[in-house]
Image (cartoon, rainbow, N blue to C red):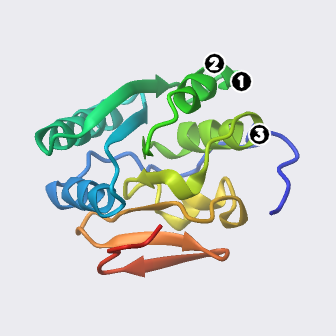
Amino acid sequence: MEALTSPLLKTSASYNADLTATDAEVATVIRIARDRRARNIVIGSGRTPHALATSRLIKSAWDRTGGGTLDTITWPETGASWLRHASRFAAADPDLWVMVGPATGWAQMTRRLLWSTPWSPARTLATAGIGDPRTLALVGLTNLDGLAGASADGTSWLVAHDSLVHLTHMEGKR
């Protein structure tokens, strides 16, 4: 694994990857979680209106399947540390974590998670904005092995062996 020299980004994302998730995207996140036999999740999101709306959509869809949501947390797009948010996000130790953008805040949070907690990308699902190669590059594919998620069109993606792989179906992947 490529070592992070600091949990903080040197620069912010230079593009907008902050969209409300599509119905197909939410359905795919739920399907992947069910395929992985998750019972309990923790949802983390940025604080923008789109990120908060996506977080609510995922929680509602997950609740309808009978799943449990142990916690929902938010993190700022800019801040000094993210340690408090990362510690709370990782502490619940769910079957799966679910993460919602936007890019800069997600990258800062993820870098802090990698730096300071036992959080695992392999036990994490994310939305399309996070699956954007430019967003993933803010943390580095080397550091995100196993991170999976949904694209806006309902297909899925996976970070595996330093590559972003687009899939049509991920049944059974861990």
Q: Residue under label 2, please give it.
A: 84
Q: Residue under label 3, please give it.
A: 115
Q: Can residue 100 be seen in this view?
A: no
Report the residue at 35% width, 36% height from top.
51
The answer to whether residue 110 is above or below residue 149 is: above
Cα–Cα span, label 1 and label 2: 8 Å
Q: Residue under label 1, please give it.
A: 81
Splitting the image into 4 quarters, where does residue 111 fall? top right
> Which amino acid does the dot numbered 1 rest on?
Ser
Pick the residue in front: 4 or 95: 95
Q: Characterize the local packing of mark 1: few (<14), some (14-19) or many (20 or more) Cα atoms within 10 angstroms.
A: few
Q: Residue 72 carries which label?
A: none
Circles 1 and 2 in contact, beta carbons < 8 Å:
yes
Local secondary structure at mark 1: loop
> Which amino acid does the dot numbered 2 rest on?
Arg
Local secondary structure at mark 2: helix
From the top left corner, tell me how far across and down residue 11 is, in percent: 71, 43
Closer to the camera: disc 1 or disc 3?
3
Q: Characterize the local packing of mark 2: few (<14), some (14-19) or many (20 or more) Cα atoms within 10 angstroms.
A: few
Pick the residue in front: 134 or 39: 39
Pick the residue in front: 149 or 137: 149
